Amino acid sequence: MMKPVAPSFPASSHDHRHCMHEALRTAEHLCASQGVRLTAIRRRVLELIWRSHRPSGAYELLEQLAAEGHKPSPPTVYRALEFLLAHGLVHKINSRNAYVGCSHAGESHVAQIFICDRCSNTTEQADDAVERRIRRNARDLHFHIREQTVEIAGLCPRCAEQHDGA
Amino acid sequence: MMKPVAPSFPASSHDHRHCMHEALRTAEHLCASQGVRLTAIRRRVLELIWRSHRPSGAYELLEQLAAEGHKPSPPTVYRALEFLLAHGLVHKINSRNAYVGCSHAGESHVAQIFICDRCSNTTEQADDAVERRIRRNARDLHFHIREQTVEIAGLCPRCAEQHDGA
DNA sequence: TGCTACAGTGTTATTGTATAACATTGCCAT
DNA sequence: ATGGCAATGTTATACAATAACACTGTAGCA
Ligand SMILES: [Zn+2]
Ligand SMILES: [Zn+2]
Ligand SMILES: [Zn+2]
Ligand SMILES: [Zn+2]
């Protein structure tokens, strides 16, 4: 069973049903093992976020929930997001005020996230070399890191190609 | 004339008047050389931002301007910020929706910004090693970078010390 | 001198993002 | 059952950013 090393962007062409199922399954396992509850709303929000690899805004999620007749209010969604963030199931993309599923849930990693300006698809890496170098610089400054946020904006392979062609 | 190598956080104890003057002078030179106008409002906003090394929110700046009797409306400040961003005079701190003066204005750099959770002071580095490694990873993904955003949150030396002591 | 073009600013209104504060519900343990 | 607590519901508000359009001043040019 060898993972395709995904040298390219996820949106290219991959079995996203699998992607999504895997994420949900992992989430359930993680919550169970940590003794926290993946309630209906939390699970539903996570599912909605995993509908794609594009970051979802909170109010976008609200609308999708409303479309199912549920019609919750902002705090409901923000609380679900807060939970998912706290347990490492999603990342917040600060440059977009939006949220995307974590591809390394439960793996204790520092993510670098690539975001396409055009199609909004994202992919997540966890390169130790980047993380270590930043940590080293912090040490030199006597700065105590709580969290690293690395967001890289630009064009994904597919969109870059179209851009060239045109 | 040798710059103190600032191995520590800026807020520690430094001649901030100098800091601020230098920044304004640089801004004037840059604008002049680029043939763009550092108008009164733009200049005033930049000065307000440089009052400290803590990121300032747009509405915070609005209030400070109002305190001087000017009382502008949001678009005025946002337009000034847009200008300052476009010309590399300030950085936006996405994780805080706030703006801080750029310490490397005119130097063509990719910044990594350290932000203290407790006192909000920031410091900016431009380590090529970090930048290059990220660029390399992007190349492997066939991703075309437009912009890198690196924000590191945690405790500055001073605050970390107090934290230990307590 | 007067005209034009345009960058800059003013003004009003609205959209978008996030949280405060407090009430209610449902679950579990004693 | 009942007290405690996590989760959710509800209302209102704070905070951040932009849209759309009007006005002004200046710089180039006839
Ligand atoms: Zn997928
Ligand atoms: Zn794309
Ligand atoms: Zn300073
Ligand atoms: Zn501090």
Image (cartoon, coloured by chain):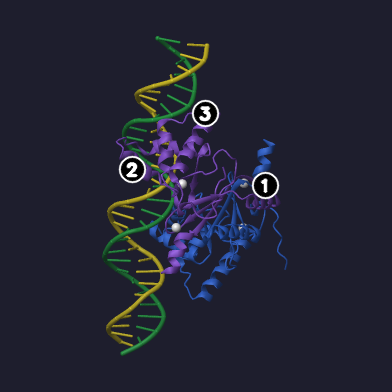
Chain colours: A purple, B blue, C yellow, D green
Marks 1 and 2: which is nearer the front? 2
Q: Which residue is mark 2?
A: A63
At which x and y percent is residue A130?
63, 53
Snapshot quadrant of residue D1: top left
At which x and y percent is residue A68?
31, 37
Tell me which amino acid carries mark 3.
Ala
Tell me which amino acid carries mark 1.
Pro
Count of numbered marks? 3
Q: Which residue is mark 1?
A: B157
- Sequence-earlier tag: 2 or 3: 3
Quick one: label 2, few (<14), some, or many (20+) residues within 10 Å?
A: some
At which x and y percent is residue A112?
56, 51
| Gap between marks 1 and 2 measured at Cα | 44 Å
Marks 3 and 1: which is nearer the front? 3
* Chain name for mark 1: B
| Gap between marks 2 and 3 measured at Cα | 29 Å
* Chain name for mark 3: A
Residue B125 visible in rendering: no
Front position in the image: B12 or A31: A31
Front position in the image: A18 or C3: A18
